[in-house]
Amino acid sequence: MHRLRTPAAAAAVAVAVLAVVSAAITFPESWSWATDQREAFASVEVQPDVVFRYQQLFPADAVAFVRERVRKKERFFLVTRGGDDVVLGVPRATAARTFARYALLPAVQIDSVDDADVVVAVGVDPGTLGVPFDRVEWDRKNGVAVARIAR
Amino acid sequence: MTRLLLLQVLFLGLGAALLPVLGIARDRATLLARLPLAYMLGIAAGGVVAAQLALLGAAVGPLELAVLTAMLALIGWRRRRPSKRTLRGRRGAWLGGAGEIATSVVLLLGLLLLAHVTRMLETRPLYEWDGWAIWATKARALYVFGGAYEPVFAHYAPVQHPLFFPALEAIDFRALGRFDGTLVHVQLGLLGIGFAAALWTLLRERVPALFASICVLAIVSASAFVKQLSTNYADVPLAIMVALGVVCLARWIADGERSLLAPTAVFLAAATLTKPEGLLFAAAALVAALASGGRERLRGTLLASAAVAALYLPWRVFAGVHGLRNPEYSLGDAFDPRYLADRADRLGPALRSVAGHAFSLDWGLLLPLALAAVAAALLARRWRLAGFAAGWGLLSFAGVVLVFWISVVPVELTLRWAAYRTVASLVVGAAALAPLLAADAWTPLARQRAERVEGRLDAAAGGQET
């Protein structure tokens, strides 16, 4: 084996062997993972505005209810109840706000009710904010309210 | 779906037009040989342009891409030159016909796996947290507002993330004519396929084709690569840009391959505009290149650095104007000994976690493979290349650890959230360099040739050794 006479060539062969072994270890796992994922997700009915894994934060029809009442670029403030972490290090209220800012685009979530056009309340009464409203509309089934702030 | 695939043809066309314009392929033969690089070049360039224009409130869609491609193709056509054999392909030279068959089989295995993953991604909705909470939210906002609408992009956390990845996905939504959180995953699978083709193209000019194919297969079949690619997180797209940029830069450092300086700049700029860590990996590459390249590589490396900085600058200006700060860490703290000493208890967990994830079997044996390749390069006396790879790897590793050290987020949380994916660029980049590092150790003849090249370079540099 002329090519293996030097330590450098041996190291290069080691690289090739490691690459082959690496692919042999990971290829079957990656292939079967992709197969399993396809089987798992192929039957899932996906709605464009929701992430089904986090539907408990904001049900799909509640998202539709709010989207029908909040216009593009309108600023909304989300008020929700607190609770335990939804995922590691993310409390329920933060998770709900994060989800709402995604799901309610092109309306824009803001951090202060003073600058908002609309209050979106999930699981709480928007009246508890002490802000005057022109109109409050309820989705009683999901406990979601859209309250337009009086100007 | 058809529209999304037609958009990919546009990206391919954009990259193909850029090949002659950027001097990557100056004649027809080189253009054909480097065509598999075109798709990723088009993605990187298109994404960078879209990210810059988004800052000005201007949207990029298929029409704009088509116009840009047509203009660049015209410029490229006017610059065409007669064909001549300028590439030193080493395809199958050491194994003959059997080697070529094996090369094709191995490469096809990698592409088959990525096609299988892409087919799965066609059905995969947004699922993991950051995939929708950060990246899809920003991509959707760019799509619906036509640019970086200030109330969103100056306030939706994390504000410090630049716009390459969401700008790329916003182009997808414009091609589709709607926001689609499921089909957008197909783009990620195609990124994987484009990466395999581009990396193989860059490697095979210097490396036996079978060896290049095996290493590409090892990278793209790593389960961490496949799983993270599927999540709509930006870490694997970042790793792809970093790896391609680092390999182009290594070819410049090792061989003086001037035609790869432009793609170096494009890919590394795309990396800086993908995530804040992209700046770390790109800076580490450029510093390592400056340190290892010697005097005769200095000007080219500085030019590439200036191009990366120029392409990154608009984002920094936008961030400065809007007062966007990274709430998790400030790089200035890295230079404050008292701050570092106060948080010294974070160093051990950060070191253990980053190293543990980098050597995890989820990445296969990619890092051991890269370390063996550095050893092979050192034994083959490829000082510049070994110095560049080791320098980039060490700086990148130290940078990742440093970020976790100085972060204000509780260490157990930040390591659990991010360490497993922050190492993606380090592992993929190092593994992508491995074939280049080991190639010249294959045969004594190749080693002697490498020594002659090094000798000539050193003589040209006035005896300066790296």
Image (spheres, coloured by chain):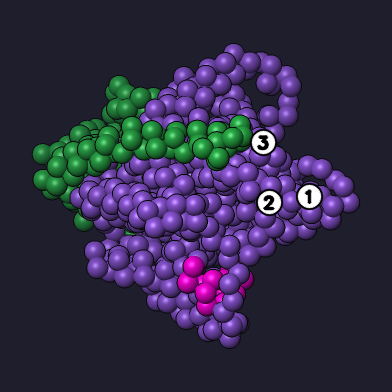
The one nearer the camera, B455 or B158, is B455
Colour of the chain lettered A: green
Q: Is residue B31 magenta?
A: yes
Q: Up-down: is B262 above or below B342? A: below
Q: Could you say where residue A83 lies in the image, as x and y percent from the top left?
A: 29, 23
Q: Could you say where residue B158 lies in the image, as x and y percent from the top left?
A: 48, 41
Q: Which residue is mark 1?
A: B455
Name the residue type under label 3.
Leu
Q: Which residue is mark 2?
A: B449
Q: Provide the chain ID for the residue under circle 3.
A: B
Mark 1 or 2, closer to the camera: 2
Q: Please state the extent of the stretch shown in magenta in the rendering.
A: B20-33
Q: Secondary structure at mark 1?
A: helix
**Chain that appears purple:** B
Q: Residues within 10 Å of mark 2 (few under 14, many from 20)?
A: few
The one nearer the camera, B215 or B414, is B215
Q: Residue furthest front?
A: A1
Q: CA distance from mark 2 to mark 3?
A: 15 Å
Dot placed on the residue nearer the N-terminal end, 1 or 2: 2
Place residue B265 in its image quadrant: bottom right
> Where does the N terminus of chain B fall, quadrant-wise?
bottom left
Q: Could you say where residue A132 lies in the image, as x and y percent from the top left?
A: 32, 43
